[in-house]
């Protein structure tokens, strides 16, 4: 996958994109990443990229001509998603990340200041994504969150194939608890089933723990999750106080 970011702060990406899984993805040739400075397209000797809003009011607006030049310089194909990170976009979810992870190329545009000239949206943006209902000072951190969520889903990026399938949200549920050695920590032991060696029992327990955690913490997720008859029975028992 090729990801190109347009930003006023390309150096912000250096650390995140040079460590851990993002670095491994690049090192393995699964991700071609670049961050380009919007100022390079200002066409102005002072490298000016923003101006005050028509109609007055505070803040500065990223200029349309500058951003359009920056986007056009990347020569997006007709089907390349050109995504603006903004608090007004659709929310980033597991499904959105999974869909984007199947694309060959993404262009991410990071807004800053009060916003971008509306004509950029109309002429060059194909999608707008928010990482949550709060406002960041710019789209850079949001772009990094999106990149991480998307790139880890590209086949071959994470070592253990299939481990992502059990991730929280991958099947609409939160994941249950995990344990590793030692068997006892300050009097707290590991649930016996996990050391029993009964694979089917372990899977049943994991499923029930995922259902329980979701029921306790994010019950609204259960409305959209795919649930089996056994899942529904277990949830009914939980609600009746007849299961733990
Ligand atoms: N830019 C500013 N706030 C943002 C948010 N919540 N999501 C994406 N981009 C943003």
Image (tube, rainbow, N blue to C red):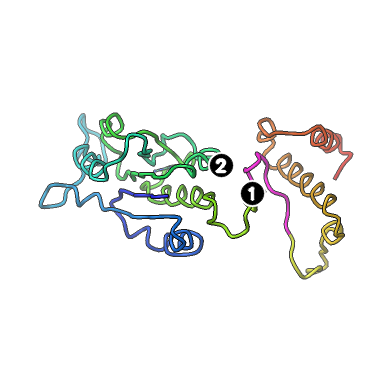
Disc 1 residue crowd, few under 14, some 14–19, many 20+, Cα 10 Å: some
What residue is disc 1 on?
A: 167
What residue is disc 2 on?
A: 94
Residue 95 position, x and y percent, is 55, 38
Q: Which structural element holds mark 1?
A: loop
Q: Which residues are magenta?
A: 167-178
Q: Quadrant of ligand 1?
A: top left
Assess whether mark 1 and mark 2 are in contact (beta carbons under 8 angstroms). yes
Residue at the far right in the pictured view: 242
Quadrant position of residue 241: top right
Quadrant position of residue 88: top left
Residue 29, numbered circle: none
Residue 79 position, x and y percent, is 37, 35
Disc 2 residue crowd, few under 14, some 14–19, many 20+, Cα 10 Å: some
Instruction: Find out whether residue 171 is within the magenta segment.
Output: yes
Q: Is residue 202 left or right of residue 158?
A: right
| Disc with the residue nearer the chain's start (2 vs 1) | 2
User: Relative to 12, is 216 above or below?
Assistant: above
Residue at the far left in the pictured view: 45
Instruction: Find out whether residue 218 is within the magenta segment.
Output: no
Q: Main secondary structure of the magenta part?
A: loop
Front-most of 198 and 244?
A: 198
Residue 234 position, x and y percent, is 83, 37
Query: Residue at (83%, 67%) from the top-left corner?
Result: 187
Q: Which structural element holds mark 2?
A: helix
Residue 115 position, x and y percent, is 30, 39
Q: Is residue 17 left or right of residue 7?
A: right
Distance from label 2 to label 1 (Cα)? 10 Å
């Amino acid at each position: 996958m090729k990801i190109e970011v347009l930003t006023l702060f390309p150096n912000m990406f250096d650390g995140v994109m040079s460590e851990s899984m993002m670095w491994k993805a690049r090192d393995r040739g699964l991700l071609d990443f670049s961050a380009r400075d919007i100022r390079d397209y200002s066409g102005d000797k002072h490298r000016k990229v923003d101006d005050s809003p028509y109609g007055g009011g505070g803040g500065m607006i990223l200029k349309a001509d500058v951003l359009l030049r920056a986007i056009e310089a990347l020569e997006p194909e007709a089907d390349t998603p050109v995504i603006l990170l903004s608090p007004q976009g659709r929310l980033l979810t597991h499904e959105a990340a999974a869909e984007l992870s199947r694309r060959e190329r993404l262009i991410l545009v990071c807004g800053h200041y009060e916003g971008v000239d509306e004509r950029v949206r109309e002429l060059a943006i194909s999608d707008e994504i928010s990482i949550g209902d709060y406002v960041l000072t710019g789209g850079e951190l949001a772009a990094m969150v999106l990149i991480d969520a998307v790139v880890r889903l590209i086949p071959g990026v994470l070592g253990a194939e299939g481990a992502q399938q059990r991730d929280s949200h991958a099947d609409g549920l939160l994941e249950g608890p995990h344990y590793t050695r030692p068997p006892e920590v300050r009097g707290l032991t590991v649930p016996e089933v996990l050391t029993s060696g009964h694979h089917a029992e372990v899977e049943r327990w994991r499923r029930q723990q995922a259902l329980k955690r979701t029921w306790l913490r994010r019950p609204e997720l259960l409305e959209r999750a795919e649930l089996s008859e056994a899942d529904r029975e277990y949830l009914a028992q939980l609600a009746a106080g007849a299961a733990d």
